[in-house]
């Protein structure tokens, strides 16, 4: 009952997925640059620049890339809290370590939604 290894494994899988999405975001950001122009995003998915109004910034890509940091941070926090605790410890593991799990899983879910929007509306 005191073991939360399953939650930690789920968070590790979420971190792996978030890393993949982050790498996809990096590629899409490069491919949508003026130098490459392989991908274009619809106006509803980009913002402008106050300094250069003609520039199109895919701000959602930055959010997708940043979500990986949140998920990795959540896994690190949960794992660090669970380290060297006995299986009978229900406060340190069951309460404190688990507090990081849901925000981490939520971050990868949000990153997935954003990535789907970008991929679905971003191919020329």
Image (cartoon, grey):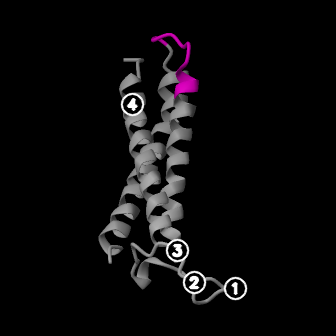
The span picked out in magenta is 79-88
Q: How many numbered marks are there?
A: 4
- Give me the disc on residue 51: 1
> Is there a contact, CB below 8 Å, between mark 1 and mark 2?
yes
Residue in the foreground of this view, choosing between 78 and 67: 67
Q: CA distance from mark 1 to mark 4?
A: 45 Å
**Residue depth check, mark 4 versus mark 3: number of the one nearer the observer:** 3
* Screen quadrant of the N terminus: top left
Q: Are marks 4 and 2 in contact (CB under 8 Å)?
A: no
How far apart marks 4 and 2 lie (CA) works out to 43 Å
Residue tagged 2: 55
Q: Residues within 10 Å of mark 4 (few under 14, many from 20)?
A: some
Between tags 1 and 4, which lies in front?
1
**Residue 112 part of the magenta segment:** no
- Residue depicted at 40% across the width and 64% down the height: 114
Q: Nearest the camera: 69 or 20?
A: 20
Residue 93 seen in render: yes
**Farthest front residue in view:** 35
- The answer to whether residue 80 is magenta is yes
Q: Nearer the viewer, residue 5 or 12?
A: 12
- In this rendering, the label closer to the viewer, 4 or 2: 2
Mark number for residue 7?
Answer: 4
Percent of width and height locating residue 112: 37, 56
Disc 3 target residue: 35
The location of residue 29, given as percent across then percent down, is 49, 66
Residue 51 or 11: which is nearer the viewer? 51
Mark 3–mark 1 Cα distance, whole angstroms, equals 19 Å
Q: Secondary structure at mark 2?
A: loop
State the residue at coordinates (41%, 48%).
20
């Amino acid at each position: 009952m005191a073991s939360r290894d399953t939650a930690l494994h789920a968070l590790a899988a979420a971190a792996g997925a978030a890393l993949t999405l982050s790498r996809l975001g990096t590629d899409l950001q490069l491919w949508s640059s003026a130098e490459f122009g392989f991908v274009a995003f619809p106006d509803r998915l980009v913002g402008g620049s106050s300094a250069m109004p003609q520039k199109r910034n895919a701000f959602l890509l930055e959010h997708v890339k940043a979500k990986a940091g949140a998920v990795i941070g959540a896994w690190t926090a949960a794992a660090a809290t669970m380290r060297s605790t006995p299986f009978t410890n229900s406060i340190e593991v069951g309460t404190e370590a688990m507090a990081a799990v849901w925000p981490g899983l939520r971050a990868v879910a949000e990153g997935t939604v954003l990535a789907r929007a970008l991929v679905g509306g971003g191919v020329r």
